[in-house]
């Protein structure tokens, strides 16, 4: 009987030790990535200075983490921020500029359409 109680005591201690060691050895949780609401509210990842890459041929800039291909090394231009790239006339990758449709010309005095020559 005495040996059985010692065995139970040791087994209970081993189980307790395993459970506490597992809880202590867990990895710390990683910070949560901003979701849809975080991006909508402006809490998206901040751009680090000098990481905005522009293509000097197409006038397109890429932010860090963009999935599109970066331009060749000889065509790259670096900016400190997206605002700086846009001020230089670049637009963001994946966002197409909307072309402005121009209708037929009108005479400013009469308001009538001006016929183009050859029609």
Image (cartoon, rainbow, N blue to C red):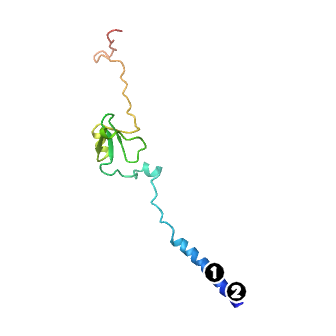
Horizontal side of 17 relative to 109 (left or right) equals right
Residue at 51% x, 72% y: name it. Answer: 24
| Marks 1 and 2, the one that precedes in the sequence | 2
Horizontal side of 82 relative to 6 (left or right) equals left
Residue at 30% x, 39% y: name it. Answer: 74
Q: Where residue 33 sits in the image (x, y, percent)?
A: 45, 55
| The C terminus, quarter of image | top left
Location of mark 2 (residue)? 4
53 versus 14 height, above or below = above
Q: Where residue 40 sits in the image (x, y, percent)?
A: 43, 48
Residue at 38% x, 39% y: name it. Answer: 93
Q: Residues within 10 Å of mark 1 (few under 14, many from 20)?
A: few
Query: For residue 58, what is the image quadrant?
Result: top left
85 versus 28 height, above or below = above
Query: For residue 110, what is the image quadrant?
Result: top left
Secondary structure at numbered mark 2: helix
Relative depth, front residue between 101 and 92: 92
Relative depth, front residue between 65 and 90: 65
Relative depth, front residue between 113 and 97: 97
| The N terminus, quarter of image | bottom right
Location of mark 1 (residue)? 12
Query: For residue 13, what is the image quadrant?
Result: bottom right
117 versus 27 height, above or below = above
Q: Where residue 9 sits in the image (x, y, percent)?
A: 64, 84
Horizontal side of 68 relative to 87 (left or right) equals right
1 versus 90 height, above or below = below
Q: Where residue 114 sits in the image (x, y, percent)?
A: 32, 13
Tell us which disc is closer to us: 1 or 2: 2
| Numbered tag placed on residue 104 in the rendering | none
């Amino acid at each position: 009987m005495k040996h059985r109680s010692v065995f139970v005591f040791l087994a209970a201690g081993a189980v307790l030790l395993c459970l506490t060691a597992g809880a202590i050895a867990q990895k710390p949780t990683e910070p949560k990535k901003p979701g849809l609401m975080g991006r909508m509210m402006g809490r998206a990842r901040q751009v680090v200075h000098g990481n905005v890459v522009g293509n000097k041929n197409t006038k397109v800039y890429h932010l860090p983490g963009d999935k599109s291909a970066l331009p060749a090394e000889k065509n790259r231009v670096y900016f400190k921020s997206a605002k700086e790239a846009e001020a230089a006339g670049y637009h963001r990758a994946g966002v197409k500029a909307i072309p402005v449709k121009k209708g037929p010309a009108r005479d400013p005095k009469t308001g009538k359409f001006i016929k183009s020559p050859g029609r």
